[in-house]
Image (spheres, rainbow, N blue to C red):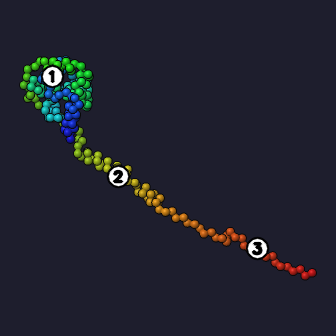
């Protein structure tokens, strides 16, 4: 997976007008002569093609990659941290690079046979991200979606109660409570006088 990502980045770099991977010979020596010694340097296998590559790091963020070429080390790509750079961007950030490439084109250094025989020790990849972690991410995403999309039992119960028709229970009024009893007739009294 990592190799495919690196290949895509290199293809993107080349398509974006990056510097050609087939550079002139002794370019590493010319860059060191014109730009000074790098802040850091490393030897490793290229993640793109598996060949030995040397990386010069200038200003802590400019990574210049070189691979063995017939006359020494040839320039391949430049990166600003993790972003590929075009040659114009590199020359803008590191003006001495243009002079170094012109000098490398005009002079040919002797072939150093030890460069071709060098091998790099494979760096151990401590990153454990892979298919198991990808599976875990997918599982957690599906679980999260299930809990977010599917309503909880309480929400389903409330929805069921809302959807039931409401039964109104009316009490039949007792009319006896509201009707006054008829008045009692007054007792008839006769007056016999």
Circle nearer the N terminus (3, 1): 1
Residue under numbered circle 1: 27
Query: Which residue is depicted at the point 20% across and 34% down?
Result: 11
Classify mark 1: residues with Cα within 10 Å, few (<14), some (14-19) or many (20+).
many
Secondary structure type for disc 2: helix
Q: Marks 2 and 1, Cα distance to the nearest angstrom?
A: 57 Å
Q: Which dot marks residue 146?
A: 2
Task: Answer with the quarter of the image where residue 178 lies.
Answer: bottom right
Alpha carbon of mark 3 to alpha carbon of mark 1: how far? 127 Å
Q: In the picture provided, is 182 more to the left or to the right than 112?
A: right
For label 3, the residue is 183
Q: Is residue 62 above or below residue 154?
A: above
Which of pointers 2 and 3 indicates the residue nearer the eye?
Answer: 3
Q: Position of residue 59 (x, y in %)?
A: 26, 23
Q: Is 166 situated left or right of 87 in this image?
A: right
Quadrant occupied by the N terminus? top left
Among numbered discs 2 and 3, the one appearing first in the sequence = 2
Kindly identify which numbered label has been placed on residue 158.
none
Mark 2 or 1: the one toward you:
1
> Is residue 86 placed above or below 188 in the rendered structure?
above
Local crowd size for mark 2, using a 10 Å CA cut-off: few (<14), some (14–19), many (≥20):
few
Query: Which one is in front, 170 or 62?
Result: 170
Q: Nearer the viewer, residue 86 or 156?
A: 86
- Near-viewer residue (15 or 128): 15
Query: How far across and how far down the image is residue 89, in percent?
Result: 25, 25
Residue at the far bottom in the pictured view: 192
Q: Earlier in the sequence, mark 2 or mark 1?
A: 1
Query: Disc 3 on helix, strand or loop?
Result: loop
Horizontally, residue 114 falls left or right of residue 92, namely left
């Amino acid at each position: 997976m990592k190799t495919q990502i690196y290949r895509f980045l290199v293809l993107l770099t080349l398509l974006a007008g990056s510097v050609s991977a087939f550079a002139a010979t002794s370019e590493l020596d010319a860059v060191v002569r014109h730009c000074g010694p790098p802040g850091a340097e490393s030897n490793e296998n290229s993640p793109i093609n598996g060949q030995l590559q040397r990386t010069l790091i200038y200003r802590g963020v400019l990574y210049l990659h070189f691979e063995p070429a017939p006359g020494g080390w040839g320039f391949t790509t430049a990166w600003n941290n993790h972003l590929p750079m075009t040659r114009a961007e590199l020359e803008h950030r590191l003006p001495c690079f243009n002079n170094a490439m012109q000098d490398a084109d005009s002079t040919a250094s002797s072939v150093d046979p030890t460069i071709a025989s060098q091998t790099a020790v494979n760096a151990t990849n401590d990153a454990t991200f892979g298919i198991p972690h990808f599976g875990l991410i997918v599982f957690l995403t599906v679980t999260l979606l299930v809990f977010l999309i599917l309503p909880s039992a309480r929400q389903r119960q409330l929805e069921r109660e809302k959807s039931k028709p409401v039964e109104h229970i009316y009490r039949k009024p007792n009319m006896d409570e509201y009707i006054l009893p008829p008045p009692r007739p007054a007792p008839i009294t006769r007056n016999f006088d």
